[in-house]
Structure formats: structure tokens, C-alpha cells
Amino acid sequence: MPIKVLVAKPGLDGHDRGAKIVARALRDAGMEVVYTGLHQTPEMIVTAAIQEDVDVVGVSILSGAHMTVFPKLMALLAERGADDMIVVGGGVIQEADIPKLKALGVRAIFDAEASTQQLIDGIERLVGERGVRERSRA
Amino acid sequence: MTSPVAGAMDFRVHRALARAISAVENRGADVVDAGAALAAAHPFVRTAPAYVIGITGPPGAGKSTLVDKLIAKFRARGETVAVIAVDPSSPFTHGAVLGDRIRMQQHHGDAGVYIRSMASREAGGGLAPTTAHAIELAKRAGFDVVIVETVGVGQVELEVVSVADVVVVVTVPGLGDGVQTIKAGLTEIADVFVVNMADRPGANQTALELTHMVHESGRAVAIVKTIATDGTGIDDLLSALALAREAGTSNAARSVRFEVIRGARDRAVAAATAALEQPEAQKIFAQLASHELDRAAAARALLALIEKEGR
């Protein structure tokens, strides 16, 4: 079955060309991509992720607000019983913040240098690992 | 434990419904079992039967924006709403970008609104293979109104009539030669026509052409002009929906007729295709190749053969 991914663009910055390129690249890799557009709050992202029951929540942040957005996002997912969803981040994120985000449960960070192929490979790997875990649990 | 209240809905139901739809969509779970489990885990009270509105029409006609405005109206009346929005899958990569909910974001904080996107996958009728199941599950989760938005359709994707109680066909002014993009097929399934973007030139002309078409068809179909972006005409659309819903029994009969005719056509096509592979048919093709028969005569001979095989 196709991997289902939410591509979300939180915050105030008005650039979503990168997010759209990502959405198209994931589509061309055979994924079903829910694209929600600009200016998403963590509440909007979590509502969409849960209603759509996505495998992966991809969050693109260029504005530097990642240390505000991700803690809220992860807390809300947990509150609504959806902390098993794979959350990945991308955009402009300082090296020093990556361990902090990983500690929050963000599974992977793709910086501005990452290619779309690296992103596709990373998502397929994370979903594959989860699939193995779920099968071993069943 | 508190007892369920009519019209109440909470986000836990969203999670359960979402999982149930995925199980049916991706893992072949049985929709009856999934629905029963859902209803048992999240009991609700229904004061009126749930009903299903199908919204269809060409790409870019404003279907998602209309749905967004309808959601707001139903919520103002206290009815809960689930939306199933279908977008096309690429036939080459099987991937899809699902963007309908971009236009419906104002409802994100409201547990009375559930929105689910579906990729059409291999299905060709304007819906996804499991859209009918998703609708059923949304009903079993307690939603009062289910709105189904099809992929942007042309003339042949008419599947929506088999799942909806009321079908709305949305068009816009200036779609080429009059209303020809919606002429065949879509006109026969519409309970309500919407001419959206009614502030554009040609809106009255489009509405007039639809009026003539409806008159010729002898069916009672309302024609409503809207400007979805600013909400103009949405109340008229609601009134038309209410009237169409009252006349709902005829719609059920029509959707069954449609199903039967489609089934009969599919069978006839399959039988004809098989008959054309028979040795007798090959003989006629050989006569065509050697100019013993002209095209019309060959076609007549083949049709006679198919009729004989059919008996």
C-alpha cells in the first residue's frame, strides 16, 4: 500500500515552494501526500494527521520557530493518542538543535542540503522499520 | 460514565474512525465488522437518519470551497459533518497529492467536523475503491451529514450516484461550448445544479442553458447560482438540498436503475469482446481484410453473431 504523508508548513513565513517540491517528489515516488498549505498551527497539523491517519508527518520550517513548534506538536500528538506517528522535520534547523528535537521524538531531520531522494529513502526506511515492529508485535 | 448526547462528537472518535477507514482502505478489513466495532466503542444518539451529499463537477469549479461553506452552515444548525474528498492517483507512479482540505481549514478546532482525503487509486469512476465503505464508517461513527467530493470529473465518472442520497453537479461559466462538459451523463445524475463563480461573465447564459436542458429531460432539478468564495447563494443551495432530500425515494430508485444499467452494459461489453475472439468472428475479419465484405457489412455480420452467441 502507498505510504501516506502529511506535508505541513507551520508558522508565519510565506514560502511554500520547497514544501510543494517535496510534496511532488514524494508523489512521484508513489506516496499519497496530503498537502495542507501555509500557516499551519500545531493544532491544525495534528488534527489533519489524525483525520487522515497518515504514516508520516513531515514538517517544514524555515523561520527558526522549530523549538516552539515541535514540542507543541509532539505533546498534542501524545495527548490525542497518536504519538506512534512518525514525525520528521526539514528546513533551516541549526545543528545544535537536532539532538534536542530527536529527544522530543522527531525521528529524522532533513536539512536544506538534503536531496529529495534522501528524503524519500529516509521516509521509506522509517516506515519500513515501523512495519517490521508492528508485524513482530502482531 | 456519561451517556451519549445527540450531536456530540469528540476527537477520540476522529482517531477511531480514521483507523477504521485505513483498515478497510489498506488492509482489506471488513466494513461491517469495522463499523460495528466503531459504533460499539463510541456510542451515539441519532435524531435523524444520516444522509450523504455527493458533490461533483469539472476540476477547478470550486467544489472544495463550496464544501467548506456547506460545512459551516450544517454546523450552525448543530449537525455534525464528515467529508470524504477524493483526488486522482497518478496511473504511472500510483502517487497522489491530496489538496482538497486546504480549502476547509477553518474547521480544524471543531470536533463536529471530520475531513478525510482519499486517493482514487485504480478506480475510474470519480471515487476511490473504498469510498463507499468510508462513507458507511462515517455514518457508523455518528456523523449526521456525509459530504463526498469526487475528483474533478468529465462526462463518464458517475460513480457518485451509487453512494449519495443527493447529487450536486457544480459547473462554472465559460466552460467552452456552453455546458457541454457536463452534458452527457452528469446531467442525468444531478439533483441540484450549481453555477459557481456566478459573478463571472456568462453565468446567466450557463444557468439558462441548464434550465433548457433540465426542461428537456423532464426531471425536477434545481439550478442555483453561487459565489462560493464569499458565500453568496449557499442558503439557496441548502434549500435546494432540503427539497431534493424530501424527494429522496425517487433518487434511490434512480441510483439502483443506474447500477443495473451499468452492470448490464458491462456484461454486454464483456460478452461482445469474448464473441469477437471466436473463430466465426475471425472468419468475418478475414473477409473484411480480403475485401469480400465492406466495413458496414462486416459490422452487421459481427453484431448478428454476437446476438446469436448471447442467446
Image: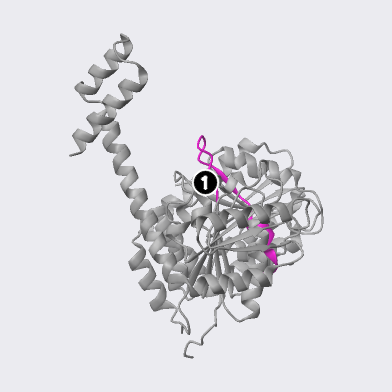
Q: Residue at x 28, y 34 (%)?
A: B272
Number of disc labels: 1
B122 or A64, nearer to the observer: B122
Relative to residue A122, is residue A64 drawn left or right?
Answer: right
Residue B202, given in percent of the width and then of the height, sits at: 75, 50
Number of other residues with Cα within 10 Å of mark 1, as a class: few under 14, some 14 to 19, many 20 or more: few
Region rendered in magenta: B87-110
Residue under circle 1? B184
Q: Taking the image as drawn, is residue B128 in sight?
A: yes
Residue B2, given in percent of the width and then of the height, sits at: 49, 91
Relative to residue B74, is residue B202 drawn left or right?
Answer: right
Q: Chain of mark 1?
A: B
Q: Taking the image as drawn, is residue A73 in sight?
A: no
Q: Is residue A18 magenta?
A: no
Where the C terminus of chain B falls, by quadrant? top left
Q: Secondary structure at mark 1?
A: loop
B6 or B94, nearer to the observer: B6
Residue A46, given in percent of the width and then of the height, sits at: 62, 64
Type of amino acid under label 1 = Ala
A57 or B220, nearer to the observer: B220
Q: Tell me where residue A73 sits by quadrant.
A: bottom right
Relative to residue B245, is residue A24 drawn left or right?
Answer: right
Q: Residue at x 46, y 73 (%)?
A: B141
